[in-house]
Amino acid sequence: MPSSVAQRSAAVDRITFTVKWGASAIQIMGYTATAFGWTPWNLYLFLVGVLGWFTVGALWNDKALMLVHLVALVAMIAGMTNG
């Protein structure tokens, strides 16, 4: 019988996989929205994708991935508020 640590690790792996691919799909939709000029929907999609990838970085404990997406998030929010 698998240990609780192994079960927890498998659960985190499933969550990470889902968030990673979900965030990727949403960012692709953001690129598509940008191509068709669907503003501000493209920005909203990018925000969700960036937050998703930041979450993946946190789950992987990958500080570089977290930093890149945190900077992108701050830049996007600053751009959206300065409009």
Image (cartoon, rainbow, N blue to C red):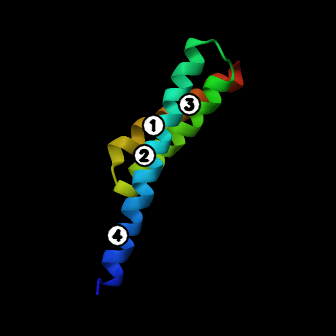
- Label 2 or label 3, whichever comes before in sequence order: 2
- Label 4 or label 1, whichever comes before in sequence order: 4
For residue 10, above or below residue 5: above
C-alpha distance separating marks 2 and 3: 14 Å
C-alpha distance separating marks 1 and 2: 6 Å
Which picture quadrant has residue 15? bottom left
Please name the residue that numbered disc 1 is placed on: 24
For residue 62, above or below residue 75: below
Q: Is residue 39 left or right of residue 5?
A: right
The structure residue drawn at horizontal position 43% and vertical position 43%, both measured from the top left corner, is 21
> What secondary structure is found at the residue carrying circle 2?
helix
> What secondary structure is found at the residue carrying circle 4?
helix
Q: Which mark is residue 58?
A: none
Along the line of sight, the residue nearer the viewer: 40 or 83: 40
Give x and y (percent) for residue 73. 54, 35
C-alpha distance separating marks 4 and 1: 22 Å
> What secondary structure is found at the residue carrying circle 3?
helix
Q: Residue furthest bottom?
A: 1
Give x and y (percent) for residue 49. 52, 37
- At label 2, the amino acid type is Lys
Classify 10 Å Cα crowding around label 2: few (below 14), some (14-19), many (20 and above). some
